[in-house]
Amino acid sequence: MIRQGYPSDVDDDTYFFLLPYLLLSRQDAGQRKHPIRDVLNALFWIARTGAQWAYLPHEFPPPETVRQQAHRWFEAGCFETAAHDLRILSRVERSRNGEPTAIIIDSRTLQSTPESGHRAGFDGTKKREGTNVHLAVDTLGHLLAVLTTPAHEQDRAQVKDLCLEVQEATGVNVEVAFADQGDTGAQTALQAAEAGVELIVVKRPEASKGFILLPRRWVVERSLAWLSRFRRLGRDLERWPSTLVGFHFLAACFLLCHNLKPLFA
């Protein structure tokens, strides 16, 4: 049993909301040796601390059990589905339509590790070997889609795929995507249009220096800051890209559940 008050304990509201999404087999299945809540607590601890699986404290189920179950959840898109439903609840609670019509897209480069090195690339601009994580959020900062590529691949080449992911998640409801100057170009705009999205590039003022708060663009930067609170997302520690994507949606679920606590009550 997990001792009460352990720092990573998932609260009751979060656990009971996520439970239906995590039941890939019956809760009382014969092969189940550890309660789902204990496994979820352990996975949350890994996401928060960024520690290696082998360093999972003894209060949790065995590391290999947690790792295997986490990969099953990630491959099945359990946290992705939960995050989309939570996003709809959050938008409705704020008197918005459940599905957005506008998104903001951006990317960041995560430093590679020995585990992820086989799929890493070198970003000549940032002088970093690693993985590019491409994100799309709505105008409230809710995570909609995540793609990963080697760091040497251009951001503009992922715009169409990112828009298609968003359209699938929102029921082809998105009309506009705000992007940075790295996505400038007629070809990029045409590819976004093929996904039914108008691409609007938000540019920095000419001759500006230092930090500038750009309209719309600050929303995705804030989302990246929220996600960076989970140390597992500070570097690319994963052997498989699906695991990296899964941890992003896991983090999004916990952030949304925290924000929706008054609604659950």
Image (cartoon, rainbow, N blue to C red):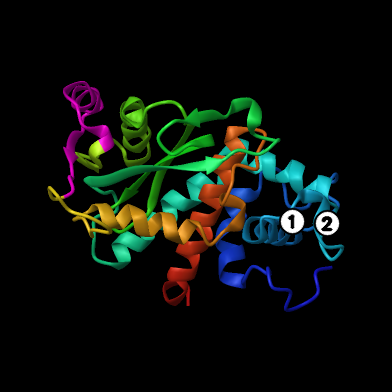
Q: Which span of residues is magenta-colored?
A: 182-204
Determine if residue 29 is in view: no
Which residue is at a point 25% across and 42% down the rendered structure image?
180
Which residue is at a point 60% across and 64% down the rendered structure image?
16
Quadrant in the rendering for residue 91: bottom left
Question: Amino acid type of disc 1?
Answer: Val
SS for callout 1: helix
Q: Residue 39 carries which label?
A: 1
Which residue is at a point 35% across and 31% down the rendered structure image?
155
Please name whichever residue, 123 or 109, is drawn nearer the observer in this view of the structure.
Answer: 123
* Residue with the mark numbered 2: 61
Label 1 crowding class (10 Å Cα cut-off): few <14, some 14-19, many 20+? many
Which residue is at a point 43% across and 59% down the rendered structure image?
225
Where's residue 8, x and y in %? 68, 68
Quadrant occupied by the N terminus: bottom right
Image position of 120 (left or right of 64): left
Check the image and name the residue furthest to the left. 206
Question: Amino acid type of disc 2?
Answer: Pro
Where's residue 247, x and y in %? 58, 48
Please name whichever residue, 194 or 111, is drawn nearer the observer in this view of the structure.
Answer: 111
Question: Relative to 127, does residue 185 appear above or below in the rendering?
Answer: above
Please name whichever residue, 197 or 52, is drawn nearer the observer in this view of the structure.
Answer: 52
Q: Residue 207 carries which label?
A: none
- Total residue callouts: 2
Residue 144 highlighted magenta (yes or no): no
Label 2 crowding class (10 Å Cα cut-off): few <14, some 14-19, many 20+? many
Determine if residue 223 is in view: yes
Mark 2 vs 1: CB contact within 8 A: yes
Image position of 26 (left or right of 128): right
